[in-house]
């Protein structure tokens, strides 16, 4: 019997092979920006301000910072994106990171449910777990999942474990949250939106970072 999965919802994960080399410098760059306005929303996601608490959210150009660990990290992330879009059979000579930011979260901090508009693949990169393995939660977008037998093969949510150095790519339309942080230290991650550029007239929200 042939089995198909017509409503395939892809998640990609990959461990950064050089994470240990860049982690300390990366955290120190993030810490300096965090200290400019600790636990404030530094960026301006218009609808995002009221669904976050006890965290610093940077502006949306984080991966554009021209410092060694970030240059290295964004290059690696772009390579993963190119591979992921290729896997999805989306052909494009240009993949762009449209926005990127970090979250620096203290105990009890969270980012409530939201989506990433105009973003075929969004991404989260885990940097520091702050003493807790709690990561993110994505809601299954397929209706009918709330059924105890169907749930044996089609889960209600996908929940990630917070593993420093781990990248997760996911479709931006899926509702997801950063669950309340339970560790004593600060939880640090960076996240981003991406899109393939398919034609010259395509509107891209912010000037991006290219990978090919
Ligand atoms: Fe998100």
Image (spheres, grey):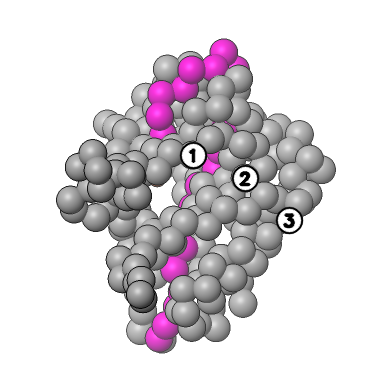
Q: Magenta region: which residues?
A: 178-199
Q: Residue furthest right?
A: 21
Per the model, the C-alpha gap separating discs 3 and 2 is 15 Å
The mark nearer the N terminus, 3 or 2, is 3
Residue 157 coordinates in the image, percent (x, y): 34, 41
Per the model, the C-alpha gap separating discs 1 and 2 is 10 Å
Q: Which mark is residue 166?
A: 2
Q: Are marks 1 and 2 in contact (CB under 8 Å)?
A: yes
The residue under label 1 is 160
Number of disc labels: 3
| Quarter of the rendered image showing ligand 1 | top left
The mark nearer the N terminus, 1 or 3, is 3
Mark 2 residue element: strand
The residue under label 3 is 72
Q: Is residue 161 left or right of residue 121?
A: right
Q: Nearer the viewer, mark 1 or mark 2?
A: 1
Per the model, the C-alpha gap separating discs 1 and 3 is 24 Å
x 60%, y 28%: residue: 129
């Amino acid at each position: 019997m042939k089995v198909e999965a017509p409503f395939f919802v892809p998640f990609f994960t990959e461990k950064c092979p050089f994470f240990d080399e860049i982690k300390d410098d990366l955290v120190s760059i993030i810490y300096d920006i965090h200290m400019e306005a600790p636990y404030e929303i530094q960026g301006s996601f218009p609808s995002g301000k009221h669904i976050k608490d006890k965290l610093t959210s940077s502006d949306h150009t984080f991966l554009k910072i021209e410092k060694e660990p970030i240059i290295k990290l964004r290059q690696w992330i772009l390579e993963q994106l190119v591979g992921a879009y290729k896997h999805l059979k989306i052909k494009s000579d240009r993949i762009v990171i449209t926005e990127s930011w970090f979250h620096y979260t203290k105990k009890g901090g969270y980012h409530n449910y939201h989506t990433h508009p105009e973003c075929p693949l969004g991404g989260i990169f885990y940097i520091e777990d702050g003493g807790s393995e709690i990561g993110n939660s994505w809601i299954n977008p397929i209706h009918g999942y709330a059924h105890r037998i169907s749930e044996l093969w089609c889960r209600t949510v996908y929940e990630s474990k917070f593993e420093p150095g781990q990248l997760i790519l996911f479709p931006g339309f899926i509702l997801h949250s950063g669950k309340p942080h339970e560790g004593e230290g600060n939880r640090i991650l960076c996240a981003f939106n991406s899109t393939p550029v398919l034609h010259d007239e395509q509107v891209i929200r912010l000037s991006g970072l290219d990978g090919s």
